[in-house]
Amino acid sequence: MLKVPYSILAPSIVLICAIGVYSMKNNIDDVVMMVLFGVVGYVLRKLQFELGPILLAFVLGRILERSLRKPCSSRGDLGIFLTKPFRRRFWDRRDDDSLHGRCGGLPTTCAGGVARS
């Protein structure tokens, strides 16, 4: 294993990262943002937070938001999440005749264009 003292290795990594971030857009604000996220990560590690789930949420959050925005932007109606395919898998586990033919029991505009309550 390579035996490099931490007092040399850590500043070298930070310097290389700062040069790389600055060279992307030639903007010092990006370097400041990198340092701020580093400080936040250090504080979270000292408070014994798991950083893996936070990193996953940071990376996948944008993808999830975009995927959830598509159905809502088509009709502007959140009832699309309660319509037949999605609702039957998750919420309609029991055989309840009162919910069939309705948009999740909420007053929304169904596929036929008729407002039901």
Image (tube, helix red, strand yellow):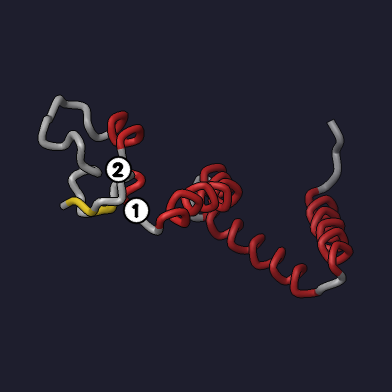
Q: For the residue marked with disc 2, what is the amino acid?
A: Leu
Q: What amino acid type is highlighted by mark number 1?
A: Leu
What SS does tag 1 mark? helix
| Residue 46: x %, y % from top left | 54, 54
Q: Quadrant of the N terminus?
A: top right
Q: Residue at image x 53%, y 56%?
A: 44
Provide the secondary structure element on which disc 2 rests. helix
Q: Is residue 44 left or right of residue 108?
A: right
Q: Nearer the viewer, residue 87 or 13?
A: 87
Q: Which residue is mark 1?
A: 78
Question: In the rendered image, which residue does mark 2 sit on?
Answer: 82
Work out whether residue 105 or residue 15 is closer to the camera in this orientation and state it: 105
Residue located 72% across and 71% down the image = 32
Task: Write the residue at 75% across / 74% down.
Answer: 29
The reply to whether discs 2 and 1 touch (Cβ–Cβ < 8 Å) is yes
- Outermost residue toward the bottom in this view: 28
Q: How many marks?
A: 2
Q: Is residue 6 left or right of residue 96?
A: right
In the depicted structure, whether residue 91 falls above or below residue 19: above
Q: Could you classify mark 2 by the number of other residues whose Cα lies within 10 Å: few (under 14), some (14-19), or many (20 or more)?
A: some
x, y percentage for residue 111?
33, 44
Residue 26 in the image: above or below residue 6: below
Q: Nearer the viewer, residue 29 or 105?
A: 105
